Image (cartoon, helix red, strand yellow):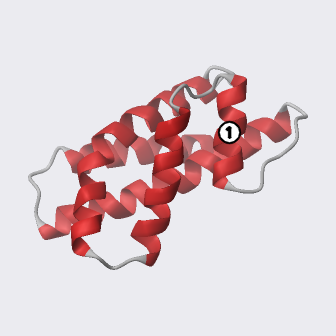
Amino acid sequence: MNTIRYKNFRQSTSKLQEVLLENKTDIVWDSAIKRYEICYELSWKSIQEQLKNEGLEVCNSPKNCFKQAFKLGLIEEEEMFADMVQNRNLTTHTYNEDLADKIYAQLEGYLQILTNLAKNIGKNYEL
């Protein structure tokens, strides 16, 4: 596995956690959403790397990567990841503050499942 990508994924979860501990302001809100987007991107790309290294069929989209990760036991919350895929697309392509605020309220839960995914991927590699 590209340990740099995995380390970046793990670090991104720490950065998301860090910003979520701050009092909510417009700047914190914007930063949390952006950090979530980075975690999301690094999560499915880390799954992609893991599958490649194990000689398995490599997924080409976040949705497919999360499905394969579920089948491999890397994630347990398949529905929550599916929800996260939809919300990630909304944060990127929709500029609706009410919608983004609802997604912001879900970031703690997303952080937990992303952190668990990082731990599960990390079990396969000595870093």
- Residue lying furthest right in this view? 55
Decide if residue 2 is in sight here.
no
Q: Which of 3 and 18 is in front in this view?
A: 18
Q: Is residue 91 above or below residue 124?
A: below
Left or right: residue 12 compared with residue 104: right
Q: Where is residue 3 in the image (x, y as percent from the top left)?
A: 67, 40
Quarter placement of the N terminus: top right
Left or right: residue 57 compared with residue 62: right
Q: Which of 100 and 117 is in front in this view?
A: 100
**Residue occupying the point 41% across, 42% down:** 13
Q: Position of residue 82 (x, y in %)?
A: 53, 46
**Residue occupying the point 8% across, 52% down:** 23
Left or right: residue 25 compared with residue 71: left
Q: Position of residue 41 (x, y in %)?
A: 56, 56
**Residue occupying the point 68% across, 39% down:** 67
Residue 56 occupies which quadrant of the picture?
A: top right
Quarter placement of the C terminus: top right
Left or right: residue 119 compared with residue 99: right
Tell me the residue that label 1 is attached to.
67
Q: Is residue 109 above or below residue 123?
A: below
Look at label 1 and name its amino acid: Lys
For numbered disc 1, what is the local secondary structure? helix
**Residue occupying the point 43% across, 68% down:** 90
Q: Nearer the viewer, residue 82 or 92?
A: 82
Decide if residue 50 is in sight here.
yes
Q: Position of residue 110 (x, y in %)?
A: 39, 42
Q: Residues within 10 Å of mark 1 (few under 14, many from 20)?
A: some
